[in-house]
Amino acid sequence: MTRSQLELANQIEQAKADMAKLRGQIEVVSYELEASQKRQKDFYVDLDNRLRKLETTSADAETKLPQVRQPKPLHLIPPPKCATTKPR
């Protein structure tokens, strides 16, 4: 084999090793992505369940509370009448 053929064979072997390493990295990243997506979905489902529970509890509490009369806005309440003093 000539020197250029040996260099080419070494480059091919190096390229094969690099490809194997990259395939391994792709496999790891794919696994991490799937795990992250599953974890995110689990968080979403948990949050959704908690919110539904709060909404149900809140709706139940509202139906059990007595009706409360809303106070009048302050600008609709007439000012109190002051006792007038007689001028001297």
Image (spheres, grey):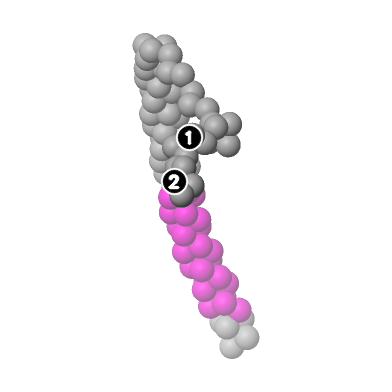
User: Which type of secondary structure does the marked residue at label 1 adopt?
Assistant: loop
Magenta residues, dominant SS class: helix
> In front here: 62 or 16?
62
Mark drawn on residue 54: none
Q: Amino acid at mark 1?
A: Pro
Residue at which label 2 appears: 36
**Residue drawn at point x = 43 percent, y = 18 percent:** 68
Mark 2 or 1 closer to N-term? 2
| Residue 52 rendering spot, x and y as whole percentages | 43, 23
- Asked whether 18 falls inside the magenta stretch, the response is yes
Q: How many marks?
A: 2
| Residue 10 rendering spot, x and y as whole percentages | 53, 78
| Residue 67 rendering spot, x and y as whole percentages | 43, 14
Pointer 2 with pointer 1, Cβ within 8 A: no
Q: Is residue 1 visible?
A: no
Gap between marks 2 and 1 measured at Cα: 66 Å
Decide: few, some or many residues near mark 2? Use Cα within 10 Å; few <14, some 14-19, many ≥20.
Answer: few
> In front here: 44 or 7?
44
Residue at which label 1 appears: 80
Q: Is residue 82 above or below residue 18?
A: above
User: Which type of secondary structure does the marked residue at label 2 adopt?
Assistant: helix
| Residue 47 rendering spot, x and y as whole percentages | 41, 33
**Magenta stretch, residue numbers:** 8-33
Q: Amino acid at mark 2?
A: Ser
